[in-house]
Image (spheres, rainbow, N blue to C red):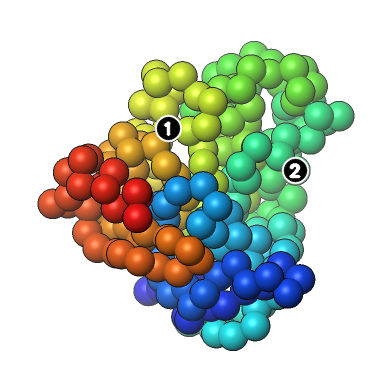
Amino acid sequence: MSLLAFHDVHALYGQARILNGVTFEVGAGERVALVGRNGVGKTTVVNTLCGGTRVAQGRIELRGRPTKDLRGYSAAQNGIAIVLQGRGILPNLTVEENLLLGGATARRGPWTLAKIQELFPILSERRSNPGWALSGGQQQMLAIGRALMANPDLLILDEPSEGLAPVIVDDLAALLVQLGTDGMGILLIEQNISLIHRVAERFYVLSKGSVAESGSLHNVSRDELQGHIAI
């Protein structure tokens, strides 16, 4: 089943056309990478899904049904959790309050506060600390934990490896593979070749606001993938 699909989506910031006929899909349990250089429209895909840009043509579907103008809360209600580039931690809330905010939709599923704290023990140790007081890696754990608290069917991550130490990227890769194995759809928006290659099963390359290449990652080397990203 397709959880999320873009069909020939053209999107505008004001009068500037940023997406030019983007088509891709992510199914249940699939791990899909959306890759490309900076400025080609990767983050705009997330903004378009959430109503931050105007769709001039094409359609976006959730589970086969057309949708538009999702916001953060309504996206979560519809089973989509997004880990934004920059993490979006609310600095005036404690670590635990940030996590509980992720569960505000009360969607049923396996992810609870206790399970998140078991997955990321540092978030339990620092549960009373303000969100801003965490290191970059810990903030990324918090952002992912908050997203999982929504018990999503689809998890979208925008440049999640940015600023992280290699050992934390290794842990992130293992977690995303396990989430996909457990049936969660993963859309990974990344430039980190190592993370993409370890996590994703399929890829789409964005170039100048459109999909320039797509395919399976099973038989694509890291060097070949780097070549795709350089388009």
Q: Which disc is residue 101 wearing?
A: 2
Q: Which disc is residue 24 wearing?
A: none
| Kind of residue indicated by mark 1 | Leu
CA distance for labels 2 and 1:
22 Å
Q: Position of residue 212 (x, y in %)?
A: 35, 66
Query: Can you see residue 31?
Result: no
Q: Quadrant of residue 79?
A: bottom right
Cβ–Cβ under 8 Å for marks 2 and 1: no
Q: Is residue 112 left or right of residue 127?
A: left
Q: Position of residue 60 (x, y in %)?
A: 55, 78
Name which of mark 2 and mark 1 comes first in the sequence: 2
Q: Secondary structure at mark 2?
A: helix
Quarter of the image with the N terminus is bottom left
Residue that extends furthest to the left in the rendered view of this protein: 219
Q: Residue at x 42, y 42 (%)?
A: 191
The crowding category of the residue bearing disc 2, from other C-alpha atoms within 10 Å (few below 14, some 14 to 19, many at least 20), is some
Between residue 43 and residue 136, name the one nearer to us. 43
Q: Position of residue 6 (x, y in %)?
A: 49, 75
Q: Which disc is residue 172 wearing?
A: 1
Q: Residue at x 17, y 43 (%)?
A: 221
Examine the rendered structure and indicate whether residue 84 appears above or below residue 30. Answer: above
Between residue 130 and residue 202, name the one nearer to us. 202
Q: Position of residue 26 (x, y in %)?
A: 40, 65
Query: Can you see residue 56?
Result: yes
| Kind of residue indicated by mark 2 | Leu
Q: Quadrant of residue 113?
A: top right
Q: How many marks?
A: 2
The crowding category of the residue bearing disc 1, from other C-alpha atoms within 10 Å (few below 14, some 14 to 19, many at least 20), is many
Q: Residue at x 64, y 17 (%)?
A: 135
Q: Is residue 64 left or right of residue 50?
A: left
